[in-house]
Image: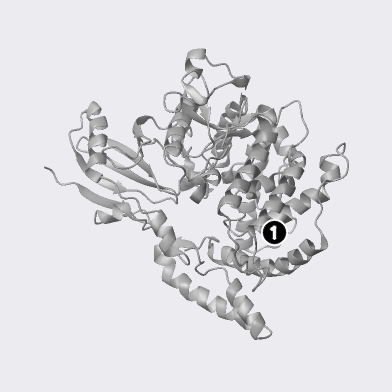
Amino acid sequence: MSTIDIRAVREDGTVEDIPEEDLYRHTRHRWLYNEARNLSQRYLKFNLQGLIQVAVEEASREGAQHCTEVLKCKEGMNNRAYLFKMDNDSVVFAKLPNSIAGPPFYTTASEVATRTFASLAEVLDIPTPRILAWSAQKANPVGAEYILEERASGQPLGALWQDWNKLPLVNRFGIIRQLVNMERKLAETTFQHCGSIYFKEDFPQGDDMKLSGTCTISPSTLGRYALGPMVGIDFWQGPKASMDLDRGPFNGPLEFLKGKAVSEMKFIQAHGRPWLNIARSLTELERPEEMVELLTKYLQLVPAMIPPSTTDDLHSSTLWHPDLHLDNLLFDNRTMKVTSVIDWQSTTAAPFFLQCGVPKLLVHPEPLSFDLTIPKRPENYMDLTQEEKEEADYRRGNEHLLKYYLRITKRDNPRHWTALQFHNEIRVQPARLVQHAWEQNIIFFLKVALMKIVNRWEHFCPDAGPCPVNFNEVEQGTFDFEAENREAIGFVLSLLQEKYGLHPEGNVVSARYDEMQMELMRLKTGFLSGAADEDERLLADKLWPYQDTMES
Protein backbone atom coordinates (compact mmCIF):
# COMPACT_ATOMS: atom_id res chain seq x y z
CA MET A 1 0.00 0.00 0.00
CA SER A 2 1.40 3.42 -0.99
CA THR A 3 2.16 6.03 1.65
CA ILE A 4 -0.24 8.94 1.95
CA ASP A 5 1.20 12.27 3.03
CA ILE A 6 -0.87 14.19 5.58
CA ARG A 7 -0.39 17.94 5.49
CA ALA A 8 -2.11 21.19 6.44
CA VAL A 9 -2.22 24.71 5.07
CA ARG A 10 -0.77 27.15 7.59
CA GLU A 11 -2.08 30.67 8.24
CA ASP A 12 0.56 32.19 5.92
CA GLY A 13 -0.40 29.84 3.06
CA THR A 14 2.58 27.49 3.39
CA VAL A 15 2.11 23.76 3.90
CA GLU A 16 3.42 21.60 6.75
CA ASP A 17 3.33 17.91 7.66
CA ILE A 18 0.94 17.09 10.52
CA PRO A 19 0.03 13.99 12.55
CA GLU A 20 -3.26 12.32 11.59
CA GLU A 21 -4.89 13.43 14.83
CA ASP A 22 -4.60 17.07 13.70
CA LEU A 23 -6.98 16.28 10.84
CA TYR A 24 -9.75 15.90 13.41
CA ARG A 25 -8.81 18.80 15.72
CA HIS A 26 -9.44 22.50 15.18
CA THR A 27 -5.94 23.94 15.16
CA ARG A 28 -6.22 27.26 13.32
CA HIS A 29 -7.72 29.18 16.25
CA ARG A 30 -7.63 29.31 20.00
CA TRP A 31 -10.18 30.95 22.28
CA LEU A 32 -9.47 33.47 25.00
CA TYR A 33 -12.40 32.15 27.02
CA ASN A 34 -14.58 29.04 26.94
CA GLU A 35 -11.77 27.39 24.96
CA ALA A 36 -12.44 23.80 26.00
CA ARG A 37 -16.07 24.04 24.91
CA ASN A 38 -15.25 25.72 21.59
CA LEU A 39 -12.57 23.17 20.71
CA SER A 40 -14.76 20.21 21.66
CA GLN A 41 -17.59 21.54 19.49
CA ARG A 42 -15.18 21.60 16.55
CA TYR A 43 -13.52 18.23 17.12
CA LEU A 44 -14.63 15.83 14.38
CA LYS A 45 -13.44 12.24 14.42
CA PHE A 46 -14.20 10.16 11.32
CA ASN A 47 -12.86 7.16 9.42
CA LEU A 48 -10.08 8.66 7.31
CA GLN A 49 -9.57 5.52 5.25
CA GLY A 50 -13.30 5.35 4.55
CA LEU A 51 -13.29 8.94 3.27
CA ILE A 52 -10.17 8.31 1.18
CA GLN A 53 -11.84 5.27 -0.38
CA VAL A 54 -14.93 7.28 -1.38
CA ALA A 55 -12.72 10.02 -2.83
CA VAL A 56 -10.63 7.53 -4.84
CA GLU A 57 -13.78 5.86 -6.17
CA GLU A 58 -14.98 9.20 -7.52
CA ALA A 59 -11.55 10.17 -8.90
CA SER A 60 -11.13 6.75 -10.56
CA ARG A 61 -13.63 7.88 -13.21
CA GLU A 62 -10.82 10.17 -14.39
CA GLY A 63 -8.15 7.46 -14.16
CA ALA A 64 -6.96 7.83 -10.55
CA GLN A 65 -5.92 4.67 -8.71
CA HIS A 66 -4.90 5.86 -5.28
CA CYS A 67 -4.59 8.94 -3.07
CA THR A 68 -1.13 10.41 -2.50
CA GLU A 69 -1.89 13.32 -0.15
CA VAL A 70 -4.53 14.53 2.27
CA LEU A 71 -4.32 18.30 2.69
CA LYS A 72 -6.22 19.95 5.53
CA CYS A 73 -7.45 23.36 4.34
CA LYS A 74 -7.60 26.47 6.50
CA GLU A 75 -10.40 25.93 8.95
CA GLY A 76 -13.62 27.87 9.13
CA MET A 77 -15.75 27.89 12.26
CA ASN A 78 -18.39 25.38 11.20
CA ASN A 79 -16.79 22.88 8.84
CA ARG A 80 -13.72 20.79 8.21
CA ALA A 81 -12.34 20.88 4.64
CA TYR A 82 -9.75 18.70 2.91
CA LEU A 83 -8.17 18.25 -0.51
CA PHE A 84 -7.44 14.67 -1.60
CA LYS A 85 -4.69 14.62 -4.22
CA MET A 86 -4.53 11.56 -6.49
CA ASP A 87 -1.75 9.78 -8.36
CA ASN A 88 -2.96 11.27 -11.67
CA ASP A 89 -2.83 14.83 -10.24
CA SER A 90 -6.62 15.10 -9.95
CA VAL A 91 -8.02 16.60 -6.76
CA VAL A 92 -11.22 15.92 -4.80
CA PHE A 93 -12.49 18.44 -2.25
CA ALA A 94 -14.21 17.16 0.91
CA LYS A 95 -16.34 19.14 3.34
CA LEU A 96 -17.51 17.73 6.68
CA PRO A 97 -19.74 19.75 9.05
CA ASN A 98 -18.86 20.16 12.72
CA SER A 99 -21.54 19.55 15.32
CA ILE A 100 -22.24 23.31 15.58
CA ALA A 101 -22.77 23.77 11.83
CA GLY A 102 -26.45 22.91 12.11
CA PRO A 103 -28.84 20.00 12.70
CA PRO A 104 -27.61 16.53 11.69
CA PHE A 105 -28.96 15.32 8.34
CA TYR A 106 -30.87 18.52 7.55
CA THR A 107 -27.78 20.73 7.18
CA THR A 108 -26.06 18.51 4.60
CA ALA A 109 -29.21 17.34 2.82
CA SER A 110 -30.44 20.90 2.38
CA GLU A 111 -27.07 22.27 1.24
CA VAL A 112 -26.73 19.65 -1.49
CA ALA A 113 -30.30 20.16 -2.73
CA THR A 114 -29.97 23.97 -2.62
CA ARG A 115 -26.70 23.98 -4.53
CA THR A 116 -28.10 21.62 -7.14
CA PHE A 117 -31.21 23.78 -7.50
CA ALA A 118 -29.15 26.97 -7.80
CA SER A 119 -26.77 25.57 -10.42
CA LEU A 120 -29.40 24.17 -12.82
CA ALA A 121 -29.33 26.05 -16.12
CA GLU A 122 -33.13 26.22 -16.31
CA VAL A 123 -33.38 27.52 -12.74
CA LEU A 124 -30.73 30.01 -11.60
CA ASP A 125 -27.61 28.89 -13.49
CA ILE A 126 -25.28 30.05 -10.71
CA PRO A 127 -21.82 28.44 -10.95
CA THR A 128 -21.09 26.12 -8.02
CA PRO A 129 -18.59 23.24 -7.78
CA ARG A 130 -20.03 19.95 -9.07
CA ILE A 131 -20.95 17.56 -6.25
CA LEU A 132 -19.46 14.07 -6.73
CA ALA A 133 -20.79 12.18 -3.70
CA TRP A 134 -22.42 12.98 -0.40
CA SER A 135 -24.07 11.53 2.67
CA ALA A 136 -26.36 13.27 5.14
CA GLN A 137 -26.24 10.24 7.47
CA LYS A 138 -23.49 9.66 10.02
CA ALA A 139 -24.06 5.90 9.78
CA ASN A 140 -21.85 5.32 6.73
CA PRO A 141 -18.30 3.97 6.15
CA VAL A 142 -16.89 7.46 6.80
CA GLY A 143 -18.63 7.78 10.16
CA ALA A 144 -19.65 11.38 9.46
CA GLU A 145 -21.74 13.47 7.10
CA TYR A 146 -19.76 14.64 4.09
CA ILE A 147 -19.87 16.31 0.70
CA LEU A 148 -17.29 15.43 -1.96
CA GLU A 149 -17.01 17.79 -4.89
CA GLU A 150 -14.76 18.94 -7.67
CA ARG A 151 -12.15 21.43 -6.62
CA ALA A 152 -13.64 24.86 -7.28
CA SER A 153 -12.03 26.52 -10.29
CA GLY A 154 -10.57 29.99 -9.96
CA GLN A 155 -9.09 31.84 -7.02
CA PRO A 156 -10.81 33.62 -4.13
CA LEU A 157 -11.61 37.23 -4.88
CA GLY A 158 -10.00 38.20 -1.59
CA ALA A 159 -6.56 37.41 -3.02
CA LEU A 160 -6.74 40.53 -5.23
CA TRP A 161 -9.64 42.70 -4.08
CA GLN A 162 -7.69 44.61 -1.45
CA ASP A 163 -4.88 45.51 -3.89
CA TRP A 164 -5.97 48.23 -6.33
CA ASN A 165 -2.78 47.81 -8.36
CA LYS A 166 -3.54 44.16 -9.12
CA LEU A 167 -7.24 44.58 -9.87
CA PRO A 168 -8.11 47.81 -11.74
CA LEU A 169 -11.43 49.58 -11.37
CA VAL A 170 -12.80 48.43 -14.73
CA ASN A 171 -12.30 44.77 -13.76
CA ARG A 172 -13.97 45.35 -10.40
CA PHE A 173 -16.96 46.85 -12.19
CA GLY A 174 -17.20 43.72 -14.35
CA ILE A 175 -17.24 41.47 -11.28
CA ILE A 176 -19.91 43.64 -9.66
CA ARG A 177 -22.11 43.34 -12.77
CA GLN A 178 -21.83 39.55 -12.56
CA LEU A 179 -22.71 39.66 -8.88
CA VAL A 180 -25.79 41.80 -9.51
CA ASN A 181 -26.85 39.44 -12.30
CA MET A 182 -26.68 36.52 -9.88
CA GLU A 183 -28.72 38.45 -7.30
CA ARG A 184 -31.26 39.32 -10.01
CA LYS A 185 -31.82 35.63 -10.75
CA LEU A 186 -32.37 34.95 -7.06
CA ALA A 187 -34.69 37.93 -6.65
CA GLU A 188 -36.80 36.90 -9.64
CA THR A 189 -37.40 33.42 -8.20
CA THR A 190 -39.90 33.59 -5.37
CA PHE A 191 -41.39 30.81 -3.26
CA GLN A 192 -44.87 30.52 -1.83
CA HIS A 193 -43.53 29.40 1.57
CA CYS A 194 -40.53 30.01 3.84
CA GLY A 195 -38.23 27.07 4.48
CA SER A 196 -35.18 25.15 3.32
CA ILE A 197 -34.84 23.18 0.10
CA TYR A 198 -34.48 19.37 0.08
CA PHE A 199 -34.63 16.61 -2.49
CA LYS A 200 -38.06 15.01 -2.40
CA GLU A 201 -36.51 11.55 -1.97
CA ASP A 202 -34.62 12.72 1.14
CA PHE A 203 -37.56 14.52 2.74
CA PRO A 204 -40.76 13.09 1.21
CA GLN A 205 -42.97 14.69 3.88
CA GLY A 206 -41.90 18.17 2.77
CA ASP A 207 -44.21 20.60 0.99
CA ASP A 208 -44.27 20.59 -2.80
CA MET A 209 -42.10 23.34 -4.23
CA LYS A 210 -44.31 26.12 -5.56
CA LEU A 211 -42.70 29.09 -7.24
CA SER A 212 -43.99 32.46 -8.32
CA GLY A 213 -42.25 35.36 -9.98
CA THR A 214 -40.74 35.30 -13.47
CA CYS A 215 -38.86 32.01 -13.15
CA THR A 216 -40.25 29.15 -15.27
CA ILE A 217 -39.20 25.61 -14.38
CA SER A 218 -40.48 22.37 -15.84
CA PRO A 219 -42.79 20.34 -13.55
CA SER A 220 -40.43 17.36 -13.75
CA THR A 221 -37.51 19.44 -12.44
CA LEU A 222 -39.55 21.13 -9.74
CA GLY A 223 -40.97 17.76 -8.68
CA ARG A 224 -37.51 16.62 -7.55
CA TYR A 225 -37.53 19.15 -4.71
CA ALA A 226 -39.47 19.82 -1.52
CA LEU A 227 -39.56 22.67 0.96
CA GLY A 228 -38.94 21.56 4.53
CA PRO A 229 -37.87 22.85 7.95
CA MET A 230 -35.46 25.74 8.38
CA VAL A 231 -31.89 24.59 8.92
CA GLY A 232 -30.82 27.75 10.77
CA ILE A 233 -29.10 26.85 14.04
CA ASP A 234 -31.50 29.15 15.96
CA PHE A 235 -34.21 26.51 15.58
CA TRP A 236 -31.96 23.61 16.63
CA GLN A 237 -29.34 24.74 19.13
CA GLY A 238 -28.83 22.69 22.30
CA PRO A 239 -32.01 21.11 23.75
CA LYS A 240 -34.08 22.56 20.89
CA ALA A 241 -32.77 19.81 18.61
CA SER A 242 -34.84 17.15 20.40
CA MET A 243 -37.96 19.29 20.83
CA ASP A 244 -41.09 19.17 18.71
CA LEU A 245 -40.92 22.74 17.41
CA ASP A 246 -42.52 24.23 14.32
CA ARG A 247 -39.51 24.98 12.08
CA GLY A 248 -41.50 25.51 8.91
CA PRO A 249 -42.31 25.70 6.14
CA PHE A 250 -44.09 28.92 7.10
CA ASN A 251 -46.82 30.60 5.10
CA GLY A 252 -45.74 34.21 4.68
CA PRO A 253 -43.84 36.73 6.82
CA LEU A 254 -46.41 37.04 9.63
CA GLU A 255 -46.39 33.30 10.31
CA PHE A 256 -42.59 33.16 9.97
CA LEU A 257 -41.88 36.03 12.38
CA LYS A 258 -44.37 34.69 14.93
CA GLY A 259 -43.04 31.16 14.54
CA LYS A 260 -39.58 32.25 15.66
CA ALA A 261 -40.93 33.61 18.94
CA VAL A 262 -43.37 30.75 19.56
CA SER A 263 -40.61 28.14 19.22
CA GLU A 264 -38.39 30.14 21.57
CA MET A 265 -41.21 30.43 24.09
CA LYS A 266 -41.69 26.64 24.10
CA PHE A 267 -37.97 26.12 24.58
CA ILE A 268 -37.73 28.53 27.54
CA GLN A 269 -40.85 27.14 29.21
CA ALA A 270 -39.35 23.65 29.00
CA HIS A 271 -35.67 24.34 29.68
CA GLY A 272 -35.27 27.89 31.02
CA ARG A 273 -33.74 28.21 34.49
CA PRO A 274 -33.17 31.36 36.59
CA TRP A 275 -29.65 32.67 36.21
CA LEU A 276 -27.54 35.59 37.34
CA ASN A 277 -27.24 38.38 34.77
CA ILE A 278 -24.28 40.30 36.20
CA ALA A 279 -24.92 43.33 34.02
CA ARG A 280 -28.34 43.72 35.66
CA SER A 281 -27.77 42.62 39.26
CA LEU A 282 -25.18 40.90 41.44
CA THR A 283 -27.86 39.26 43.57
CA GLU A 284 -31.23 39.10 41.77
CA LEU A 285 -31.71 36.26 39.30
CA GLU A 286 -33.15 36.81 35.84
CA ARG A 287 -36.19 34.54 35.51
CA PRO A 288 -37.43 32.64 32.42
CA GLU A 289 -40.86 34.15 33.03
CA GLU A 290 -39.42 37.58 32.25
CA MET A 291 -38.21 36.35 28.88
CA VAL A 292 -41.61 34.79 28.17
CA GLU A 293 -43.23 38.17 28.93
CA LEU A 294 -40.81 39.82 26.52
CA LEU A 295 -41.65 37.26 23.85
CA THR A 296 -45.34 38.03 24.37
CA LYS A 297 -44.55 41.69 23.69
CA TYR A 298 -42.62 40.64 20.57
CA LEU A 299 -45.66 38.75 19.25
CA GLN A 300 -47.85 41.81 19.75
CA LEU A 301 -45.38 43.98 17.85
CA VAL A 302 -44.89 41.67 14.84
CA PRO A 303 -47.16 43.72 12.51
CA ALA A 304 -44.69 46.61 12.82
CA MET A 305 -41.81 44.36 11.74
CA ILE A 306 -43.33 43.82 8.28
CA PRO A 307 -42.90 46.61 5.71
CA PRO A 308 -45.89 47.81 3.66
CA SER A 309 -46.83 45.98 0.49
CA THR A 310 -45.18 47.27 -2.69
CA THR A 311 -45.43 46.45 -6.39
CA ASP A 312 -42.01 44.79 -6.09
CA ASP A 313 -43.35 42.34 -3.48
CA LEU A 314 -40.89 42.45 -0.60
CA HIS A 315 -42.91 39.88 1.37
CA SER A 316 -42.49 36.82 -0.86
CA SER A 317 -40.04 34.17 0.23
CA THR A 318 -36.74 34.39 -1.65
CA LEU A 319 -33.57 32.31 -1.70
CA TRP A 320 -30.49 34.38 -0.88
CA HIS A 321 -26.82 33.52 -0.35
CA PRO A 322 -26.18 34.03 3.38
CA ASP A 323 -22.50 35.01 3.32
CA LEU A 324 -21.15 36.68 0.18
CA HIS A 325 -17.71 37.72 1.34
CA LEU A 326 -14.49 37.88 -0.69
CA ASP A 327 -13.42 34.27 -0.19
CA ASN A 328 -16.79 32.82 -1.21
CA LEU A 329 -16.54 34.25 -4.74
CA LEU A 330 -13.96 32.61 -7.00
CA PHE A 331 -12.95 34.05 -10.34
CA ASP A 332 -10.65 33.48 -13.30
CA ASN A 333 -7.97 36.20 -13.24
CA ARG A 334 -7.52 35.93 -17.01
CA THR A 335 -11.12 36.31 -18.13
CA MET A 336 -12.34 38.11 -14.98
CA LYS A 337 -15.35 35.77 -14.92
CA VAL A 338 -16.83 34.51 -11.66
CA THR A 339 -16.25 30.75 -11.78
CA SER A 340 -17.75 29.55 -8.48
CA VAL A 341 -19.98 30.75 -5.68
CA ILE A 342 -19.31 28.59 -2.62
CA ASP A 343 -20.61 28.07 0.93
CA TRP A 344 -24.37 27.72 0.56
CA GLN A 345 -24.68 26.00 3.94
CA SER A 346 -27.80 27.01 5.92
CA THR A 347 -29.31 28.90 2.96
CA THR A 348 -33.06 29.34 3.33
CA ALA A 349 -35.98 30.85 1.47
CA ALA A 350 -37.39 33.62 3.67
CA PRO A 351 -39.23 36.95 3.28
CA PHE A 352 -37.15 39.15 0.98
CA PHE A 353 -37.15 42.16 3.31
CA LEU A 354 -35.28 40.00 5.84
CA GLN A 355 -32.88 38.54 3.28
CA CYS A 356 -31.83 41.55 1.23
CA GLY A 357 -28.66 43.54 1.75
CA VAL A 358 -25.40 44.74 0.25
CA PRO A 359 -22.86 41.88 -0.11
CA LYS A 360 -20.19 41.88 2.60
CA LEU A 361 -17.42 42.46 0.06
CA LEU A 362 -18.95 45.89 -0.75
CA VAL A 363 -20.08 47.02 2.69
CA HIS A 364 -18.85 50.54 3.51
CA PRO A 365 -18.35 51.81 7.09
CA GLU A 366 -20.65 54.80 6.48
CA PRO A 367 -24.47 54.42 6.62
CA LEU A 368 -25.95 53.27 3.32
CA SER A 369 -26.85 56.26 1.14
CA PHE A 370 -28.90 56.21 -2.05
CA ASP A 371 -27.16 59.29 -3.40
CA LEU A 372 -25.45 57.68 -6.40
CA THR A 373 -23.12 60.58 -7.15
CA ILE A 374 -19.55 59.44 -7.80
CA PRO A 375 -17.51 60.34 -4.69
CA LYS A 376 -14.85 63.04 -4.96
CA ARG A 377 -11.55 63.51 -3.20
CA PRO A 378 -11.70 65.64 -0.03
CA GLU A 379 -11.25 69.38 -0.62
CA ASN A 380 -8.03 69.44 1.40
CA TYR A 381 -6.57 66.47 -0.50
CA MET A 382 -3.45 68.36 -1.65
CA ASP A 383 -2.64 69.32 1.95
CA LEU A 384 -2.63 65.69 3.15
CA THR A 385 0.46 63.61 3.78
CA GLN A 386 1.20 60.78 1.35
CA GLU A 387 -0.12 58.24 3.84
CA GLU A 388 -3.31 60.25 4.34
CA LYS A 389 -3.76 60.56 0.57
CA GLU A 390 -3.46 56.79 0.15
CA GLU A 391 -6.06 56.24 2.89
CA ALA A 392 -8.40 58.82 1.31
CA ASP A 393 -8.00 57.20 -2.14
CA TYR A 394 -8.64 53.75 -0.70
CA ARG A 395 -11.85 54.88 1.03
CA ARG A 396 -12.98 56.78 -2.07
CA GLY A 397 -12.34 53.73 -4.24
CA ASN A 398 -14.40 51.47 -1.99
CA GLU A 399 -17.21 54.02 -1.85
CA HIS A 400 -17.12 54.24 -5.65
CA LEU A 401 -17.55 50.45 -5.89
CA LEU A 402 -20.57 50.58 -3.57
CA LYS A 403 -22.15 53.40 -5.59
CA TYR A 404 -21.58 51.44 -8.80
CA TYR A 405 -23.17 48.34 -7.23
CA LEU A 406 -26.22 50.38 -6.23
CA ARG A 407 -26.53 51.95 -9.70
CA ILE A 408 -26.38 48.55 -11.42
CA THR A 409 -28.82 47.10 -8.89
CA LYS A 410 -31.25 49.96 -9.56
CA ARG A 411 -30.97 49.36 -13.31
CA ASP A 412 -30.93 45.55 -13.47
CA ASN A 413 -32.50 44.29 -10.23
CA PRO A 414 -35.36 46.65 -9.31
CA ARG A 415 -36.85 44.30 -6.70
CA HIS A 416 -33.62 44.33 -4.70
CA TRP A 417 -33.29 48.10 -5.18
CA THR A 418 -36.74 48.60 -3.68
CA ALA A 419 -35.96 46.20 -0.84
CA LEU A 420 -32.79 48.11 0.02
CA GLN A 421 -34.71 51.39 0.10
CA PHE A 422 -37.41 49.97 2.36
CA HIS A 423 -34.89 48.18 4.58
CA ASN A 424 -35.07 49.42 8.15
CA GLU A 425 -32.82 47.99 10.87
CA ILE A 426 -35.41 48.83 13.52
CA ARG A 427 -37.94 46.57 11.78
CA VAL A 428 -35.67 43.54 11.33
CA GLN A 429 -33.54 43.62 14.49
CA PRO A 430 -36.04 41.85 16.81
CA ALA A 431 -36.31 38.86 14.43
CA ARG A 432 -32.52 38.54 14.34
CA LEU A 433 -32.22 38.48 18.13
CA VAL A 434 -35.31 36.67 19.35
CA GLN A 435 -34.09 33.07 19.05
CA HIS A 436 -30.77 33.43 20.84
CA ALA A 437 -31.41 36.26 23.30
CA TRP A 438 -31.85 33.91 26.27
CA GLU A 439 -29.00 31.51 25.54
CA GLN A 440 -26.47 34.23 24.70
CA ASN A 441 -27.39 36.62 27.52
CA ILE A 442 -28.50 39.38 25.17
CA ILE A 443 -32.07 39.79 26.42
CA PHE A 444 -31.17 43.43 27.02
CA PHE A 445 -30.59 43.98 23.30
CA LEU A 446 -33.87 42.31 22.37
CA LYS A 447 -35.60 44.65 24.82
CA VAL A 448 -33.83 47.63 23.22
CA ALA A 449 -34.98 46.46 19.78
CA LEU A 450 -38.60 46.12 20.95
CA MET A 451 -38.52 49.53 22.64
CA LYS A 452 -37.50 51.06 19.33
CA ILE A 453 -40.45 49.35 17.64
CA VAL A 454 -42.78 50.76 20.32
CA ASN A 455 -41.41 54.25 19.74
CA ARG A 456 -41.98 53.91 15.97
CA TRP A 457 -45.34 52.10 16.15
CA GLU A 458 -47.41 54.97 14.73
CA HIS A 459 -44.97 55.35 11.84
CA PHE A 460 -44.84 51.63 11.05
CA CYS A 461 -48.56 50.93 11.64
CA PRO A 462 -50.40 54.24 11.09
CA ASP A 463 -53.83 52.59 10.79
CA ALA A 464 -53.51 50.06 13.64
CA GLY A 465 -54.45 52.30 16.54
CA PRO A 466 -52.44 52.73 19.77
CA CYS A 467 -49.39 50.55 20.34
CA PRO A 468 -50.42 47.42 22.30
CA VAL A 469 -47.13 47.31 24.24
CA ASN A 470 -45.56 49.52 26.87
CA PHE A 471 -42.69 49.11 29.31
CA ASN A 472 -43.52 50.01 32.94
CA GLU A 473 -41.37 51.94 35.40
CA VAL A 474 -39.88 48.82 36.99
CA GLU A 475 -38.83 47.45 33.60
CA GLN A 476 -37.42 50.83 32.64
CA GLY A 477 -35.48 51.06 35.91
CA THR A 478 -33.73 47.69 35.51
CA PHE A 479 -33.13 48.57 31.87
CA ASP A 480 -31.39 51.86 32.70
CA PHE A 481 -29.06 50.19 35.24
CA GLU A 482 -28.14 47.43 32.81
CA ALA A 483 -27.67 49.93 29.97
CA GLU A 484 -24.86 51.64 31.88
CA ASN A 485 -23.04 48.35 32.45
CA ARG A 486 -23.61 47.20 28.89
CA GLU A 487 -22.09 50.45 27.68
CA ALA A 488 -18.90 49.70 29.62
CA ILE A 489 -18.75 46.18 28.15
CA GLY A 490 -19.41 47.57 24.67
CA PHE A 491 -16.54 50.02 25.05
CA VAL A 492 -14.12 47.19 25.82
CA LEU A 493 -15.38 45.05 22.94
CA SER A 494 -15.17 47.96 20.48
CA LEU A 495 -11.67 48.87 21.63
CA LEU A 496 -10.41 45.32 21.14
CA GLN A 497 -12.18 45.00 17.81
CA GLU A 498 -10.70 48.23 16.43
CA LYS A 499 -7.17 47.81 17.82
CA TYR A 500 -6.65 44.06 17.48
CA GLY A 501 -9.48 42.79 15.26
CA LEU A 502 -10.60 40.63 18.19
CA HIS A 503 -14.01 39.05 17.76
CA PRO A 504 -16.42 39.14 20.75
CA GLU A 505 -16.36 35.31 20.70
CA GLY A 506 -12.70 35.52 21.67
CA ASN A 507 -11.21 33.47 18.84
CA VAL A 508 -7.72 34.35 17.60
CA VAL A 509 -5.31 32.60 15.27
CA SER A 510 -3.24 30.23 17.37
CA ALA A 511 0.04 32.08 16.79
CA ARG A 512 -1.39 35.22 18.46
CA TYR A 513 -2.89 33.50 21.50
CA ASP A 514 -0.11 34.20 24.02
CA GLU A 515 0.26 37.79 22.82
CA MET A 516 -3.47 38.46 23.20
CA GLN A 517 -3.63 36.79 26.61
CA MET A 518 -0.95 39.16 27.88
CA GLU A 519 -2.65 42.18 26.32
CA LEU A 520 -6.02 41.24 27.83
CA MET A 521 -4.44 40.94 31.27
CA ARG A 522 -2.99 44.44 30.86
CA LEU A 523 -6.28 45.92 29.66
CA LYS A 524 -8.28 44.22 32.40
CA THR A 525 -5.98 45.71 35.03
CA GLY A 526 -6.68 49.16 33.59
CA PHE A 527 -10.42 48.40 33.43
CA LEU A 528 -10.50 47.45 37.12
CA SER A 529 -8.37 50.41 38.20
CA GLY A 530 -11.12 52.77 37.07
CA ALA A 531 -13.45 51.51 39.83
CA ALA A 532 -14.24 54.06 42.56
CA ASP A 533 -14.48 51.53 45.40
CA GLU A 534 -14.35 47.82 46.16
CA ASP A 535 -17.98 47.22 45.19
CA GLU A 536 -17.42 48.84 41.78
CA ARG A 537 -14.22 46.84 41.37
CA LEU A 538 -16.08 43.59 42.08
CA LEU A 539 -18.73 44.54 39.53
CA ALA A 540 -16.10 45.49 36.93
CA ASP A 541 -14.30 42.18 37.50
CA LYS A 542 -17.48 40.22 36.89
CA LEU A 543 -18.45 42.36 33.87
CA TRP A 544 -15.13 41.78 32.08
CA PRO A 545 -16.23 40.01 28.88
CA TYR A 546 -13.31 37.68 28.14
CA GLN A 547 -13.65 35.06 30.88
CA ASP A 548 -15.12 31.58 31.08
CA THR A 549 -18.86 31.37 31.60
CA MET A 550 -20.51 28.90 33.94
CA GLU A 551 -22.05 26.76 31.19
CA SER A 552 -18.59 26.07 29.73
Tell me if I can see residue 378 in this picture. Answer: no
Residue 379 drawn above or below residue 322: below
Q: How is the image coloured?
A: one colour
The image shows residue 19 at horizontal and vertical percentages of 24, 56
Using the rendered view, name the quadrant where residue 309 is placed. top right
Farthest top residue in view: 219
What residue type is disc 1 on? Met
Tell me if I can see residue 367 in this picture. Answer: yes
Residue 198 placement, left or right of 20: right
User: Residue sitting at 74 percent across and 64 percent down?
Assistant: 479
Using the rendered view, name the quadrant where residue 43 is placed. bottom left
Residue 2 drawn above or below residue 494: above
- Residue denoted by label 1: 382
Along the viewing direction, whichever of 386 and 545 lies nearer the viewer? 545
Residue 345 drawn above or below residue 271: above
Farthest front residue in view: 270
Using the rendered view, name the quadrant where residue 84 is placed. top left
The image shows residue 528 at horizontal and vertical percentages of 60, 80
Residue 22 placement, left or right of 245: left
The image shows residue 308 at horizontal and vertical percentages of 78, 33
